[in-house]
Amino acid sequence: MLKDQIINDIQGVFLDSDEFGDTHNIDGTDKTVIVDDDLLEQKKMQHDLYQAELLFHIASSDIDKPEPGQSMLFDDKSYRVLSAIENDGMYTVTLHRNAY
């Protein structure tokens, strides 16, 4: 099935550390994610998300869906979730750095 192939591609291709994925610590646990600075800049310009400071993709099987306003530690820095959009087994998470 196509859905099964997509799930296999998420882990085997997109999040593969030899391809696109990098290891980052999220809320105290190492996870493989893709930090996407290009998409972040596009979103800032298109959607007036000037406060957004970090955007990453992660397999939806790796974390519970983040909720807007939720606190999240990313590489030991405190952020707030601006948005988390699920698409084909992955979340695209946009974060804003906490002032403290």
Image (cartoon, rainbow, N blue to C red):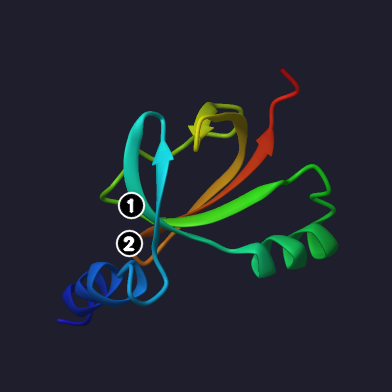
Tell me: 37 left or right of 41.
left
Q: Position of residue 50 (x, y in %)?
A: 83, 48
Residue 79's image quarter? Answer: top right
Crowding around mark 2 (Cα neighbors within 10 Å: few <14, some 14 to 19, many 20+) is some
Q: Secondary structure at mark 2?
A: loop
Kindly identify which numbered label has been placed on residue 18: none
**Where is 56 relative to 77, above or below?**
below
* Quarter of the figure with residue 12: bottom left
Asked if residue 99 is positioned above or below residue 2 in the image, the reply reads: above
Q: Which residue is mark 2?
A: 89
User: Is 43 on the left or on the right of 5, as rendered?
Assistant: right
Secondary element at image label 1 = loop
Quadrant (top left/top right/bottom left/bottom right) for the C terminus: top right
Amino acid at dot 1 = Ser
Name the residue rendered at 41%, 56% in the picture.
33
Residue at 30 percent across and 70 percent down: it is 16
**Residue in the foreground of this view, choosing between 7 and 22:** 22
Q: Residue furthest top?
A: 100
Q: Position of residue 89 (x, y in %)?
A: 32, 61
Residue that label 1 marks: 60
Give the left or right position of residue 30, taking residue 51 as reference.
left
Q: What is the x, y in percent for residue 91?
A: 44, 54
Q: What residue type is disc 2 on?
A: Gly
